[in-house]
Image (spheres, rainbow, N blue to C red):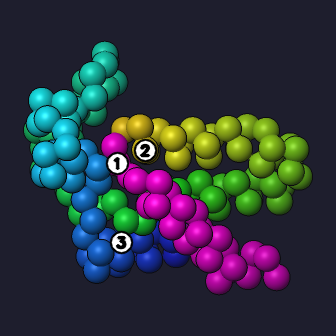
Amino acid sequence: MLLGYAISYILFSLLPAWGSRWALVELRLLKESEQQLLGYGLTRAINHIMYRGIAHKGGAMLSSHASTAAVFLFWSAHLWGFWGGAGAGAGVLVIGTALGAIYGRHHYVSDIVAGMLLGVFALWASGFFG
């Protein structure tokens, strides 16, 4: 996971892609008033942190969350087998992480796919598959 995050943060500085919550407003495809998601409790707290604090706009490509999710998925399958790990709870968590990142306008689908590929690469580089 550390390798995935290290590569992600290096690429953030080389590929400063904005997440859709910023880019859609900038391109005038989303009204600024619609930039924040509506909701209660946790959603309001996250909006407060993200929009009233220091906003980091350039951390979308590639998703380090998806990288971590891929590592978690393969590690779970390694420990408990496909149906015990990847096919059960771990798979649900990984899909939920990906969908949540897209729905929350933090990442595009391409960011998620690239992040998962990075996770697989990090596992390969660490000798996990060998």
- Looking at the image, is 93 positioned above or below residue 45? below
Instruction: Indicate which disc residue 24 carries.
Output: none
Q: Name the residue under label 1.
A: 106
Determine whether, in the image, residue 106 is placed left or right of residue 49: right
**Residue drawn at 64 percent across, 61 percent down:** 71
* Residue 46, x across and y down, in percent: 27, 33
Find the distance from the CA under tag 1 to the CA under tag 3. Answer: 15 Å
On the rendered image, what quadrant is the C terminus found in?
Answer: bottom right
Image location of residue 64, percent across then percent down: 46, 61
| Position of residue 65 in the picture relative to residue 129 (left or right) | left
* Residue that label 2 marks: 102
The residue wearing badge 3 is 9
Q: Relative to 81, is 122 above or below?
A: below
Helix, strand or loop at disc 3? helix
Q: Which of 63 and 111 is in front in this view?
A: 111
Identified by mark 2, the residue type is Ile
Residue at image position (37%, 65%) is: 61
Check whether the beta carbons of the residues at disc 3 and disc 2 lie within 8 A of each other. Answer: no
Q: Which is in the foreground here, disc 1 or disc 3?
A: 1
Q: Is mark 1 on a helix, strand or loop?
A: loop
Is residue 37 shown left or right of residue 102?
A: left
Determine contact: label 1, label 3, CB under 8 Å: no
Q: Please report the bounds of the magenta region as a residue range.
A: 105-130
| On screen, residue 95 above or below 56 | above
Label 1 environment density (alpha carbons within 10 Å; few <14, some 14–19, many ≥20) = some
- The amino acid sitting under disc 3 is Tyr
Q: At 73% from the left edge and 37% from the top edge, which residue is drawn?
A: 89
22 in relation to 48, above or below: below
The answer to whether mark 2 and mark 1 are in CB contact below 8 A is yes
> Alpha-carbon distance for marks 2 and 1?
6 Å
> Viewer-proximal residue, 103 or 2?
103
